[in-house]
Image: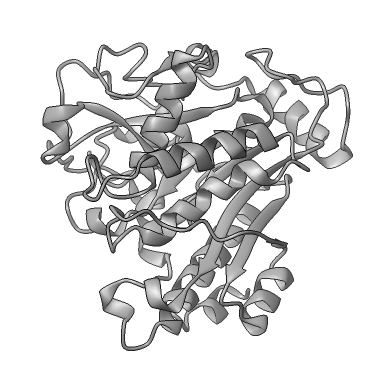
Amino acid sequence: ASPLGAWKRLAGMPVCSKTLRSTRVNYTADSCPCSLGGCTSLWPCTASRLCFKHDLPSAAVAASHRAAALGSATASSDLDGDGGGRGSHGVTYLFFLSFNRSLVRNAFASNPWKARAREVNRVLWFMHTARAVGTLLPVHAVVAGDRDAASEAKLEAAGVRLLSGPMVPSPAWASKWHRLSFNKIAALSFTQFRKVVVLDNDVGLLRSMDHMLLHAPAPAAVFHTTIGPLAKRTPCAVTTGLLVLRPSQRAFARALSTLAAMNYSRETYDGGDEEFWLRYFADGAAAGEPLYELPWRYHTHRLLPLPPEEWYRVRMLHLIGSLAGRGFCIPRNATRAAEMYPTWTTRTEKWGL
């Protein structure tokens, strides 16, 4: 049966959480709520052309896939004219497996190695979903700090290409929950790539996203409506589970300088890398470098109340642990993907990885 046929056989409409409902936001997979939906934000945002494309037509997606497979230097160009025209060369998905046993979260304090095993399993799960949807572009993972040869061998066997990278020290104001997240700043240092899509480890693909990586401008991110105390300050904000970046030594030096200048003692935003990226992108926008917004279809989470037919168009699902069990608005195929997602240390053999 076709995927569309399976969707048509959905038994009724799922019960959607109303937590994130807003009369000012149009809940579709194409939504760009900050730049086009009137959802105000502390973050700078400029609509990318992907906000207007309503997903690329199938012919363009097929061409992007062929370009990825053949390494064509002519089959692709960036929609926002930010240095494209070189095909799929120099673009990659990028994960971070930087590990320091002294910086793990409290739940892993008695056995910090479980924290690393969990993150490795998450990346292996991404690779499982990437193969299932026909991803052709490369996937790299940055390994730094306390290394483990056995887990790195598993990653390489699954098709992940490993990169050695620097550890970026967390600032004094960093939350214990987010201290390792600042290592994502090092993505700007990998100048062998023209463009990278930095992903949190706990994501999976429902459809291929190769064309987005080939065509998206940089820097770019997806904005989500916020909840809790943060919603009073900024109704929309970037969730850094997906960042499109253009590495350069100049950008990396500016990032380290920005982080060093944030030398206060208590957090002012979230205590994690998003607090850094807010300042970094705001400074960039002030200097004439926009932060482009991408549609929701490229980065959704389980609490996003999309109608069932819109979930058919979603490409990446972010399985944020703190949102688990807080209400689903997801049809059965995406729900199954969430239920199958391995979150501990010994499940990967089930997926044949």
x, y (%) of residue 138? 73, 49
Q: How is the image coloured?
A: one colour
Measured along the vertical axis of the image, is residue 38 above or below residue 161?
above
Tell me where residue 57 appears, x and y as whole percent: 62, 20
Point out residue 94 in the picture as x, y percentages from the top left corner.
Answer: 61, 50
Q: Quadrant of residue 174?
A: bottom left
Q: Quadrant of residue 137?
A: top right
Report the side of 164 relative to 209 (left or right): right
Residue 1 at least partly seen: no
Q: Quadrant of the C terminus?
A: bottom right
Tell me: residue 83, above or below residue 15.
above
Residue drawn at point x = 40 percent, y = 39 percent: 261
Query: In front here: 253 or 312?
Result: 253
Above or below 326: residue 243: above
Task: Look at the image and tell me whether residue 24 can be seen.
Answer: yes
In percent of width and height, residue 74 lies at 87, 22
The residue depicted at 16 percent of the width and 43 percent of the height is 15
Q: Is residue 314 left or right of residue 27?
A: right
Q: How many marks on residues?
A: 0
State the residue lying farthest toward the bottom.
Answer: 110
Task: Identify which residue, 168 or 315, lies in the foreground.
Answer: 168
Residue at image location 65% in from the left, 84% down from the top: 150
Front residue (pair 83, 173): 173
- Would you place residue 239 above or below residue 75 in this image? below
The one of 318 and 44 positioned closer to us in this rendering: 44
Residue sitting at 69 percent across and 19 percent down?
A: 78
